[in-house]
Amino acid sequence: MQNFLDTEIKFLKGVGEARSKLLSSEIGVATFRDLLYYFPFRHIDRSRFYSIAELEGSDLPAIQIKGRFISFRVEGEGVRKRLVGVFSDGKRMIETVWFSKVKEMSSLYKPGVEYVIFGKPVAFHNSYSIAHPEVEIFNPEKPPTGFRGVYSLTDAMRKKGLSTRVLQSLADNLLKHPRFNTIPETLPAEIVSRYKLMPLQEALRQMHFPEDIRSLQLATERLKFEELFYVEAHILRYSMERSSKLPGFYFRKIGENFNGFYFNVLPFKLTGAQKRVLKEIRADMKTGRQMNRLLQGDVGSGKTMVAFMTMLMAVDNGFQSALMAPTEILATQHYATIKEWAHPLGIKVALLTGSTRSRERKDIHEGLLSGEIKIIIGTHALIEDTVQFKSLGLAVIDEQHRFGVAQRARMWSKSKIAPHVLVMTATPIPRTLAMTVYGDLEVSVIDELPPGRKPVTTLLRYDSNRMEVDRLIVSQLREGRQVYIVYPLISENEKLDLKSLEEGYKRTCETFPSYKVCFVHGKMKPEEKDHQMDLFVNGEARIMVATTVIEVGVNVPNASVMVIENAERFGLSQLHQLRGRVGRGADQSYCILMSKAKAGADTKKRLAIMTETTDGFLISEADMKIRGPGDMEGTQQSGLAFNLRVANLARDGQILTRARETALAVLRGNPSLLAPGCAPTEAKPEDMPPIILAENDLGIIRCELATRFAKSVDWSLIS
């Protein structure tokens, strides 16, 4: 017999062939399971009636109003034809609009009859309207009560008559199906009992049709825990399997290169955080297992120095190191820095990018194969098949969120034994996101800036403050400093009311005629981009006009001003990255966020966060709460390839921690979740890259692991 939840949605009462195609194409509901887990995004208290007067100056979600239709009229022709109804609550009026089934709707509702309309009010020309409202005759003996779910709908669904009420009816049909009670519990009884979780069937009912607020809260908590439990179990199982199956190089000693650099060459004193992280890395490399460590640290915190000293550990133990960066600008920057540090030690360092010439490329390939080149810095060029190493022992991935999973995997497949892996990011990652996306890596944090660095002063300004901003720029230029001005667009776009680099470059040249201005954007040819960058790096150009291409990899300590135009268009983490381009020297630096004066209160509040703190972790937490984890840069590439239906990584940290601890307890005795008597399979480095591959649908992960749990786990071991 077919699994009840896998039944095609067309076989549900009220669906049929046409609706099933619409549900599948518009919201991905193709089976009973899909509909069951297509939860309302909001629940409305149906016992509450709003007056039209309450809409004034508010942004309410879907609401219900009791009253009567005063009149109807048809406007437009052809595809623009629409039915407009005027609805009154006895004191004020609101318009209702239907864009389809005009003739049918015009004869359906009668003026003078008391109705309840339900929908989302939208402001337009100082009045309000509700498009495609749900309408029902008001029955004073049975007024609406309880909570009603509001489902996400598309325009195509609305035009075809698939409203929230229809989805509610379909969900009701599914919950009343004779086989609904056959749905098995997906969490072990021990966990349900221990945490007093609502049983699955009841939780699903309450999510669609909650009896009260408390029931909805318990149902939501149950489903959040389940979702996060299986995510963490999947990540941890993968991590434990890889750790048990993949050996690593044993770095036995701290030798003459590391010690010689530390005592004789090190250009500045290491911070306490840098020393702590190096000790953590050293401990990993002595285990005989592959190191997989994520190094987080704000811009300028000294991650590159930690990476280089880790490379010296590799050299001292007879191994080569590779550092892969996402752009030529960043790779070249790393190369210049590391070559300078390595030169007194006699360690050969090379740079390999897409621009490397054929003859030089051939020499680099030979040097890597012979072992003469100990450290290679590069871009995606490092993962080409022609690049082979004599003994690659360490792979460093910088700004790793900019690489795809397959690209990263090709780096550590360059060795028969998986090299130690250090991934670095200057984008602070919220703890809950790190536990999920990077749950299979150990995490190190550099939470100190080198001594002498002054916090960047961040100011929020509007076009009316333009002259004030220009005066600040002039004062810094006269002191010999340099300035960045960043724009969201390269060219003017009629559809977007945003400032562009082209118009900005012209204005900058006219406003500051005494100073040379250069410009950089992502569509420039590499050689032209490098030329413009060199003008700024060597100080010949005092002002750089750019897009966000300078977000990483530009290190000009003399730059003291960062102006970001249309700052409201950028996420907080990106603004923080851009701000990190200044404040790299000992002088006071400034970041000016230019925004529209008419920006909404939420936008101003969001930008104000940047003016209040320079703590990247606080900013990243705020950014995730505002934008959600799915929108955080790089998370889709980095492993969060499924969508959480109920849980929210920005708000459910406690549940996530509890779910992770439970998953750890379950997996501790049987990391692979193998049934008794089953032998583990062999693994190769390229099969198990260190960033979690969560490409399966969460439902599949849940089903697979639930089956394994049932067969292989001794639940009495859970503490």
Image: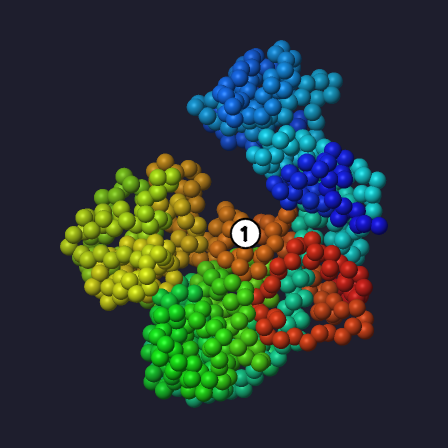
Which of 251 and 153 lies nearest the eye of the viewer? 153
Count of marks placed on residues? 1
Quarter occupied by residue 230: bottom right
Q: Amino acid at mark 1?
A: Gly
Label 1 sits on residue = 630
* Residue that appears at 20% across and 64% down: 540
* Residue that appears at 68% across and 18% down: 137
Please state the horizontal and vertical placement of residue 232, each as a whole percent of the image. Answer: 65, 60
Q: Secondary structure at mark 1?
A: helix
Residue farthest front in this picture: 78
Structural crowding at the residue carrying mark 1, measured as other residues with C-alpha within 10 Å and reported as few (<14), some (14–19) or many (≥20): some
Instruction: Decide if residue 452 is on the left or right side of residue 700.
Output: left
* Residue that appears at 30% across and 50% down: 501
- Residue 173's place in the image compared with 283, above or below, is above
Instruction: Decide if residue 574 is on the left or right side of residue 55.
Output: left
- Residue 156's place in the image compared with 461, above or below, is above
Instruction: Decide if residue 45 is on the left or right side of residue 666.
Output: left
Q: Is residue 266 visible?
A: no
Residue farthest left in this picture: 514
